[in-house]
Image: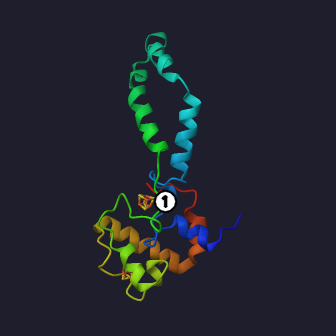
Amino acid sequence: MTYDYEYIKQRLAPCGLHCGKCFAFAQGDISKLSGELKGSLGNFDAYAERFVDMLGEPIFLKYPAFKAFLAHLSAGSCGGCRKEKCKLFKNCGVRPCIEKTGVDFCFQCHEFPCNKTGFDEHLHRRHVAINNRMKEVGVASYYEEVKDLSRY
Ligand code: SF4
Ligand code: SF4
């Protein structure tokens, strides 16, 4: 399957990070799979309590916290960086910047790598590595490389 540029742009943020694999992304695997698991577990609450004694497995006492977390993951509602302000990197300077520079991705910008991203050292390193890779192989090939990988 080949992916068109616009589809890829909805999943790869201008900085290159993969919104499509973010837990907060509405159309992402994490949200979708969490919703499916939530549905498959159905009314597991009552069973979890029973399984503590029945199976001698205290791990089932943790089910309420797991269920709450699953509900949180399944409710991912972000439309991605090109549609709304990132919920994770509140000081991101890339999104407002590309509105001025007009590029789709930072590697296409003549200032890359720059000091306008607002990223910490760790994220800066990822930003540079991702964009160098996109520059090297092209956006479509880069997306093929990362589309099934966890971003975490
Ligand atoms: S914009 Fe931020 S919060 Fe939204 S999907 Fe992308 S990385 Fe996640
Ligand atoms: S100036 Fe920096 S943050 Fe802005 S588009 Fe260029 S590389 Fe990205």
Where on the image, by quarter, is ligand 1? bottom left
Q: Within the image, what quadrant is residue 112 found in?
A: bottom left
SS at circle 1: loop
Q: Is mark 1 within 8 Å of ligand 1?
A: yes
Q: Residue at x 47, y 77 (%)?
A: 105
Q: Position of residue 53 (x, y in %)?
A: 44, 10
Q: Residue at x 45, y 73 (%)?
A: 14
Could you say which is closer to the camera, residue 76 or residue 150?
Answer: 76
The residue furthest bottom is 110
The residue furthest top is 54
The color scheme shown is rainbow
Q: Position of residue 86 (x, y in %)?
A: 38, 62
Circle 1 packing at 10 Å, graded few (<14), some (14-19), many (20+), is some
Q: Amino acid at mark 1?
A: Gly
Q: Position of residue 136 (x, y in %)?
A: 53, 80
Q: Residue at x 44, y 18 (%)?
A: 57
Q: Residue at x 43, y 54 (%)?
A: 152
The residue furthest right is 1
Say whether residue 27 is left or right of residue 90: right
Label total for image = 1
| Quarter of the figure that contains the N terminus | bottom right
The answer to whether residue 147 is above or below residue 15 is above
Q: Position of residue 110 (x, y in %)?
A: 41, 89
Pointer 1 residue: 79
